[in-house]
Image (spheres, helix red, strand yellow):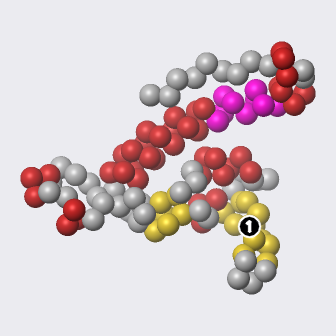
Amino acid sequence: MKEYQKHHIIPECYLTNFTEDGKGIWVYDKKNGKTFQQSVSNIFFIKDFYRINEEDIPDSLKGEVNPLTLEKDYFANEIESNYNDFLISLIPRIDELIDNDIRNACLPDIRIV
């Protein structure tokens, strides 16, 4: 299994909401002045950004702490999955605000644990 290496600083589940096809988003490359479509998995990431350096893990925890625990166990499995659920429930409410009188719209009661 391939290790997590692309650590997104903006979650992919958020970026997907700006795509036309659920996959690609329009980006602008300042170096060459070109605009093009890019997969959300290939933007707004820093390689191994959340990786814990092996030498920073105390010897007593070497077998217990995975260097990718922040990226994989915390952000991917906990934060982003809850954030994605929140976005899925929020987007229809935003459409309701746009289509109707703002006073009649009701935001969902969501608790993020």
Residue 1 is at least partly visible in this image? no
Relative image position of residue 109 (x, y in whole percent)? 61, 18
Question: In the image, 36: left or right of 5?
Answer: right
Q: Quadrant of residue 100?
A: top right
Question: In the image, 36: left or right of 55?
Answer: right
Report the amino acid beneath label 1: Val
In the rendered view, tell whether residue 87 sits above or below residue 39.
above
Picture residue at 64% right of the left edge, 59% below the top:
40
Relative image position of residue 48 (x, y in whole percent)? 41, 65
Please state, as top left, top right, bottom left or bottom right, where the C terminus lies in the image: top left
Q: At numbered mark 1, what does the secondary structure look like: helix, strand or loop? A: strand
Question: In the image, 87: left or right of 83?
Answer: right
Relative image position of residue 53 (x, y in whole percent)? 27, 65
Picture residue at 66% right of the left edge, 33% below the top:
88
> Magenta stretch: dominant SS?
helix
Residue 63 is at least partly visible in this image? yes
Relative image position of residue 71 (x, y in whole percent)? 40, 53
Q: Residue furthest front?
A: 103
Please state, as top left, top right, bottom left or bottom right, where the N terminus lies in the image: bottom left
Q: Residue furthest bottom?
A: 32
- Dot 1: within a 10 Å radius of its alpha carbon, few (fewer than 14), some, or many (20 or more) residues? some
Q: Residue furthest top?
A: 104
Picture residue at 56% right of the left edge, 37% below the top:
83
- Residue identified by numbered label 1: 27
Q: Residue 72 lies in magenta, yes or no?
A: no
Region rendered in magenta: 87-95
